[in-house]
Image (cartoon, helix red, strand yellow):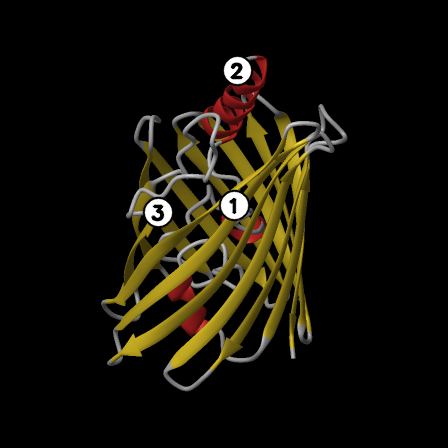
Amino acid sequence: MKKQILLALICFISIRVFGIQYNLGPRITAMGMNSSSINDDYAVSGNPAGLLAIQSATLTLNYTRSIIDNELSQETVGLVLPGKNNSLGFVFHRYGISAYNEITAGTMFARKFGKHLAIALRVNYHQIKIQNYGTTNGFSVDIGSIYKLNDQFSFGIYLNNPTLQDYANKFVKISIDQSIYFGAVYQASDKVIIATTINKSTGLPYNTSFGFEYQFIKSLSLRTGITTAPFRQFAGFGLIYKKLNIDFSIESEPFLSYTPQIGIVYAF
């Protein structure tokens, strides 16, 4: 009984307090977690339909660490292999501390349908490991789509775990988080992007996010954003040098204080 209670408590804290532990990358994070319809090198973690905007083979690395707990961190590695009308992507996430960690590995396929529509499917393997209490795992699928109305407006939607898969645990039933994201992007000019997303995760209230990016100069972009539930503030910047992008964000979050994130993108 003690084992069941501890496992349930840890999983409850992880899912309800921290939400889905996908590291969306510092650009998306700095823009208020607006991952539904922004085409981004870190689309392997957000809406997989965004892979189709990537023109060359790309490797992404990003890292997040909590300021209040030096052991709590997230690491993500992603790889995108684009084609003419379709793209492949691979991602590996790790989140947690030495005594408790979550791992997610995903493989995704995205395809264009005409000039305006992109649809993608991601298959995920999930694992939760608790020191001295063992490991549980499960599988899920994610579905994403982006519709480009014109040069200014794009709309995106994606669903995590629409089939309601669970972890394969014999002690207590643990559901893999289910969530839906819907949003829009307005390309106001060559330098300005405005984005918004509404999302809902299992057992959590509706959350709305707003984000803004301004390309100050060709090699430097400034970003900011907010979310409403819970209320969080974000800021960050991106630097471009030839084939290398370096992005940084910082998040103000009620439970974890300030959380910095850094990411590196290399296009081959």
Q: Where is residue 34? Give x, y as percent.
A: 41, 47
SS under mark 2: helix
Q: Residues within 10 Å of mark 3 (few under 14, many from 20)?
A: many
The extreme top residue here reads: 2
Amino acid, disc 3: Asn
Identify the residue at horizontal 70%, vertical 30% (top origin): 131
Q: Secondary structure at mark 1?
A: loop
Residue at label 3? 161
How many angstroms separate mark 3 from mark 1 (CA)? 13 Å
Point out the frontmost of discs 3 and 1: 3
Return the residue at label 2: 5
Query: In the picture provided, is 75 more to the left or to the right than 231?
Result: right
Residue behind mark 1 = 22
Number of numbered markers? 3
Residue 217 % position (x, y): 60, 63
Between disc 2 and disc 1, the foreground one is 2
Pick the front one: 209 or 107: 107
Q: Position of residue 79 (x, y in %)?
A: 58, 68
Question: Gap between marks 2 and 1, in whole Å?
Answer: 26 Å
Q: Which is more N-terminal, label 1 or label 3? A: 1
- Under mark 1, the amino acid is Tyr
- Which residue is depicted at the point 35% across and 47% down? 161
Q: Which mark is residue 52?
A: none
Identify the amino acid type marked 2.
Answer: Ile
Mark 1 crowdedness (10 Å alpha carbons): few <14, some 14-19, many ≥20: some
- Tell me, yes or no, if residue 73 can be seen here: yes
Check the image and report above or below for 138 versus 238: above
Say whether disc 2 or disc 3 marks the residue closer to the N-terminus: 2
